[in-house]
Structures are given as C-alpha cells and as structure tokens.
Image (spheres, rainbow, N blue to C red):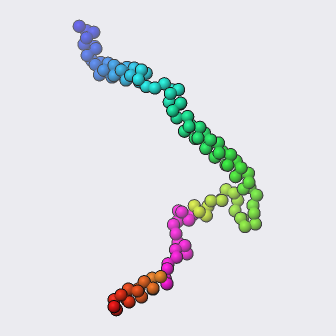
Amino acid sequence: MEIIQKLIHYKYHLLFLLLAVLVLSFLVFLAPSFLTVVAYFWPLLVSTGLFLVAVVVFGKTSAAGSTSSSSSDNYPSSMAGEGILDYVVAGPTEQHIEQPVAAAGSVEAEVEGFKAE
C-alpha cells in the first residue's frame, strides 16, 4: 500500500514518461529513414552547396581584385558600398527627386480647356 501511495505522488511524472515513450516509439517506427529524406532532398542540398561554394569563390576573387584602386575610385575596398548604404538609410533627398513641372502645367491647361467647353 505504501508503494501505491508513492506512485500516486509521482503520477504526473509517470504519465509524462509514458507519453514520451509512446511518441518516441511512434517516431522510430513511422518516420522515414534518414536516407529516404536525403534521397528526396538531394537536389536542394546539392544546389545549396554549389551556391555556397560560388559565394566563397566570388568573395575571394572580389576581395583580391578590389585591392587595387583606379583613378575614378578613391575609396578603399572596405568602403565600396558606403554610398548606396547611406542613400538607403537616409532616403531620397531633394536633389534625387525630379518633379515634372512642365507636365503639371500642361495637365492644368487641359483641365481649363474642358471647363471652357
């Protein structure tokens, strides 16, 4: 009787353990094998690997080629993208926005012409 009282004291622990054992046993028996998953996803795995190799190769060749400075580029290679980053962070300024002044005037003239008719 004393053992049953101790088991009742740990009933939630035992239920959790039983549930965990059932879930793991279903996963072992019902889940596909590792080779089945690899066989299904091999094109994705190969293309991802090739892409990562291409990134590394382009990264190494770009870094080696950008160390020499040309006459039009006075920036070091570490500041190559600073201009576009500053533009993206700050947003367009007045010098970047083009306002079609002539087009707005011609539209107003057309509207006035319709009102006159």
Q: Nearer the viewer, residue 39 or 34?
A: 39
Q: How many marks?
A: 0
Q: Is residue 20 left or right of residue 88?
A: left
Q: Is residue 94 visible?
A: no
Q: Quadrant of residue 84?
A: bottom right
Q: Quadrant of the N terminus?
A: top left
Residue at left 49%, top 84%? 102
Q: Quadrant of residue 72?
A: bottom right
The residue furthest front is 117
Q: Nearer the viewer, residue 109 or 74?
A: 109
Residue at left 38%, top 22%? 26
Task: Indicate whether residue 37 is drawn in magenta.
Answer: no
Q: Position of residue 115 (x, y in %)?
A: 33, 89
Q: Position of residue 105 (x, y in %)?
A: 45, 86
Q: Is residue 20 above or below residue 67?
A: above
Q: Is residue 76 left or right of residue 84?
A: right
- The magenta stretch is 86-102
